[in-house]
Image (cartoon, rainbow, N blue to C red):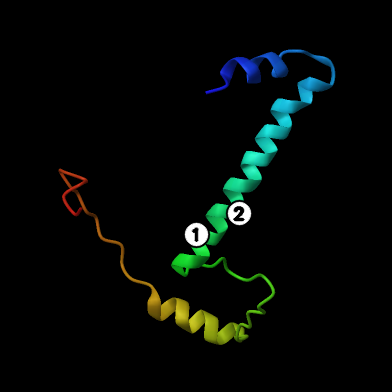
Protein backbone atom coordinates (compact mmCIF):
# COMPACT_ATOMS: atom_id res chain seq x y z
CA UNK A 1 0.00 0.00 0.00
CA UNK A 2 2.77 2.47 0.94
CA UNK A 3 5.65 0.83 -0.90
CA UNK A 4 7.06 4.11 -2.21
CA UNK A 5 7.20 5.67 1.27
CA UNK A 6 8.81 2.59 2.82
CA UNK A 7 11.36 2.33 0.01
CA UNK A 8 12.27 6.01 0.27
CA UNK A 9 12.93 5.76 4.03
CA UNK A 10 14.79 2.43 3.87
CA UNK A 11 17.16 3.61 1.13
CA UNK A 12 18.12 7.02 2.57
CA UNK A 13 21.23 5.65 4.30
CA UNK A 14 22.77 6.90 7.56
CA UNK A 15 20.61 5.94 10.56
CA UNK A 16 17.72 4.99 8.31
CA UNK A 17 19.68 1.86 7.35
CA UNK A 18 18.68 0.41 10.74
CA UNK A 19 14.97 0.56 9.88
CA UNK A 20 14.89 -2.71 7.89
CA UNK A 21 16.66 -4.52 10.74
CA UNK A 22 14.29 -3.06 13.33
CA UNK A 23 11.32 -4.03 11.17
CA UNK A 24 12.55 -7.62 10.99
CA UNK A 25 12.96 -7.78 14.78
CA UNK A 26 9.46 -6.39 15.36
CA UNK A 27 7.84 -8.88 12.98
CA UNK A 28 9.90 -11.73 14.43
CA UNK A 29 8.85 -10.86 17.98
CA UNK A 30 5.17 -10.56 16.99
CA UNK A 31 5.28 -13.87 15.10
CA UNK A 32 7.00 -15.65 18.00
CA UNK A 33 4.49 -14.37 20.53
CA UNK A 34 1.57 -15.37 18.31
CA UNK A 35 2.97 -18.84 17.62
CA UNK A 36 3.73 -19.45 21.30
CA UNK A 37 0.22 -18.48 22.34
CA UNK A 38 -1.28 -20.60 19.56
CA UNK A 39 0.62 -23.72 20.64
CA UNK A 40 -0.37 -23.09 24.27
CA UNK A 41 -3.99 -22.70 23.22
CA UNK A 42 -3.81 -26.06 21.42
CA UNK A 43 -2.34 -27.66 24.55
CA UNK A 44 1.13 -28.34 23.16
CA UNK A 45 3.89 -27.41 25.58
CA UNK A 46 7.67 -27.74 25.41
CA UNK A 47 9.45 -30.31 27.54
CA UNK A 48 10.63 -28.86 30.81
CA UNK A 49 14.38 -28.97 31.40
CA UNK A 50 14.20 -28.52 35.17
CA UNK A 51 12.55 -31.92 35.72
CA UNK A 52 15.08 -34.38 37.07
CA UNK A 53 15.09 -37.78 35.40
CA UNK A 54 16.19 -40.61 37.64
CA UNK A 55 17.52 -43.88 36.31
CA UNK A 56 17.92 -47.16 38.10
CA UNK A 57 21.49 -48.35 38.45
CA UNK A 58 22.28 -51.86 37.33
CA UNK A 59 25.09 -54.17 38.23
CA UNK A 60 27.44 -55.43 35.55
CA UNK A 61 26.12 -58.99 35.83
CA UNK A 62 22.49 -57.94 35.34
CA UNK A 63 23.46 -55.91 32.30
CA UNK A 64 25.37 -58.84 30.73
CA UNK A 65 22.47 -61.24 31.37
CA UNK A 66 20.00 -58.85 29.73
CA UNK A 67 22.21 -58.45 26.67
CA UNK A 68 22.63 -62.20 26.24
CA UNK A 69 18.94 -62.96 26.57
CA UNK A 70 17.85 -60.07 24.35
CA UNK A 71 20.24 -60.96 21.53
CA UNK A 72 18.62 -62.57 18.51
CA UNK A 73 20.12 -64.29 15.51
CA UNK A 74 20.50 -62.04 12.50
CA UNK A 75 18.31 -62.97 9.56
CA UNK A 76 19.04 -62.16 5.95
CA UNK A 77 16.17 -60.32 4.32
CA UNK A 78 15.89 -59.39 0.67
CA UNK A 79 13.15 -57.05 -0.40
CA UNK A 80 12.39 -56.31 -4.01
CA UNK A 81 10.39 -53.17 -3.21
CA UNK A 82 11.75 -51.29 -0.16
CA UNK A 83 8.50 -49.29 0.15
CA UNK A 84 6.08 -52.23 0.28
CA UNK A 85 5.72 -51.94 4.07
CA UNK A 86 4.42 -48.39 3.93
**Between 68 and 20, which is closer to the camera in this rendering?**
20
Badges 1 and 2: C-beta atoms under 8 Å apart? Answer: no
**Helix, strand or loop at mark 1:** helix
Q: Position of residue 25 (x, y in %)?
A: 69, 38
**Between 77 and 1, which is closer to the camera in this rendering?**
1
**9 to the left or right of 31:** right
Which of the 4 image quarters holds residue 10?
top right
User: Residue, x 63% and y 85% (percent of image)?
Assistant: 57
Q: Position of residue 71 (x, y in %)?
A: 38, 73
The residue lying furthest to the right in this view is 14
**41 to the left or right of 36:** left
User: Residue, x 74% and y 27% (percent of image)?
Assistant: 19
Q: Is residue 11 shown above or below 85? A: above
Which residue matches tag 1? 38
Q: Position of residue 13 (x, y in %)?
A: 79, 14
**33 to the left or right of 25:** left
Which residue matches tag 2? 33
Q: Which mark is residue 12?
A: none
Q: Position of residue 56 (x, y in %)?
A: 60, 86
Q: Is residue 9 shown above or below 74? A: above
User: Residue, x 46% and y 76% (percent of image)?
Assistant: 67
> What crowding class fits label 2: few (fewer than 14 Cα within 10 Å), some (14-19), or many (20 or more)?
few
Q: Is residue 24 shown above or below 9? A: below
Q: Is residue 18 shown above or below 78? A: above
Q: CA distance from mark 1 to mark 2?
A: 9 Å
**Between 86 and 29, which is closer to the camera in this rendering?**
29
Chain-order first, disc 1 or disc 2: 2
User: Residue, x 76% and y 13% (percent of image)?
Assistant: 12
> What crowding class fits label 1: few (fewer than 14 Cα within 10 Å), some (14-19), or many (20 or more)?
few
**60 to the left or right of 76:** right
Which of the 4 image quarters holds residue 77?
bottom left
Amino acid sequence: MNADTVTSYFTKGSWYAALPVATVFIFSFAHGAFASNLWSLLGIEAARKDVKVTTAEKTVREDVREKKSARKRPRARAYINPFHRI
